[in-house]
Image: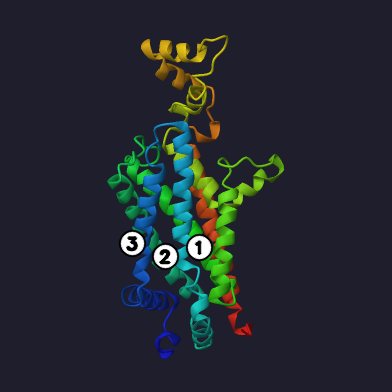
Amino acid sequence: MNQDSTRYIGRVGQTFVYLGKLFRMFLFQSDWKVLPMSAIIAALVSFAVGGNIFKTMEGTLMGAFALSCVCVWNGFFNSIQVIVRERAIIKREHRAGMHISSYVASHMIYQAVLCVLQSVITICVCMFMGMKMPQGSLVTPFPLVDFGLTLFFITYCADMLALLISCIAKTTTAAMTIMPFLLIVELLFSGSFFSLPEDVMPLTNLTSTKWGLTAICSQGEYNSLPMVSVWNSALKMKDMEVDGEKPLLDTFIYLEENNYRDELLEKSGELNQNPEFDFDTGIVVKCWLWLLGWTVVYVIISVIILEFIDRDKR
């Protein structure tokens, strides 16, 4: 880009100049490839966990975890290299009058568009694959809009974290090396999927997966769903003999013949409800605010780091 084109125009003007550059890169430098990649990942996740999500407690928890990981992966891959790969250009143009806030703002807008597209693609692919969608709305009048906003906030939060790492990393190789480590942290500290010691649970508040998983489970009415793990575990022992008889098999036959199975599964779900996953507007809004809060923090730190780029000897 011509340095003189940004030397004497204001911050807003510079933002649109760099935004135009990013969209040209999207079209002519194959940055659009992140969109079909997100479709493929969504299809794989739908195939693996789509059968039980929003149908049973266990399926919803696993599906919410998987969808949160999909969003985090999409966000990381979007921007993990975008700053570090043009660090020399940023340094040169900053010395020529480029405002760092304008540069970062252009990336925020561009990445937001990508995240919206990825969220829409993820929902469309999941629906095409036959995955059940949340049926109740909490914030907007439309359940799919609520669900789509959750996916967007998770993806965008992860995207801005990756943008921050791209500001810190010395090389593209270093940035790509850090990304799997961050992904593992997001997986392990998702809060509800893995059992963690109580003294490290506060660390889950730092991850977007924790807030994304909680919001998805809440929107999917987790606490109103049946729990099937107890039934399935007991069913595996139906042929166990006691004094030459099979009491569990007889019990299962009795329950099935008298249509008690569904009632038993619902009762099992009632006994295993999680207050954090209540179908409640406040819970979803709280998750969204946490995700937006961390997004803002990542952006502010990114701007501060790049403001000192002239002192960088790399």
Question: Mark 2 and mark 3: span between their CA atoms?
Answer: 16 Å
Residue 6: x percent and y percent? 42, 84
Residue flagged by tag 3: what amino acid is it?
A: Pro
Looking at the rendered image, the disc whose residue lies closer to the viewer, 1 or 3, is 3
Labels 1 & 3 near each other (Cβ < 8 A): no
First in sequence, mark 2 or 3: give its number.
3
Q: How far apart are the two marked residues, 1 and 2, measured between alpha carbons?
A: 8 Å
Residue 261: tell me if it is visible: yes
What is the x, y in percent for residue 79? 47, 67
Q: Which mark is residue 111?
A: 2
Query: In this image, 285 relative to 27: left or right?
Result: right
From the top left corner, tell me how far across and down residue 103 is, in percent.
47, 75
Crowding near the residue tagged with mark 1, few <14, some 14–19, many ≥20 C-alpha atoms within 10 Å: many
* Residue bearing mark 1: 160
Residues 34 and 201: in front is: 34
* Residue 36 numbered tag: 3
Secondary-structure class at tag 1: helix
Dividing the image into 4 quarters, which one contains the N terminus? bottom left
User: Is disc 2 surrounded by few (<14), some (14 to 19) or many (20+) residues within 10 Å?
Assistant: many
Q: Is residue 148 left or right of residue 176?
A: left
Q: Amino acid at mark 1?
A: Met
- Marks 1/3: CA–CA distance: 21 Å
* Mark positioned earlier in the residue sequence (1 or 2): 2
Q: Kindly indicate the quadrant of the structure image that contains residue 184.
A: bottom right
The extreme right residue here reads: 199
Q: Is there a contact, CB below 8 Å, between mark 1 and mark 2?
A: yes
Give neighbour class at mark 3: few <14, some 14-19, many 20+ (Cα, 10 Å): few
Disc 3 on helix, strand or loop?
helix
Front position among marks 2 and 3: 3
> Hey, what amino acid is under mark 2?
Gln
Res 307 quadrant in image: bottom right
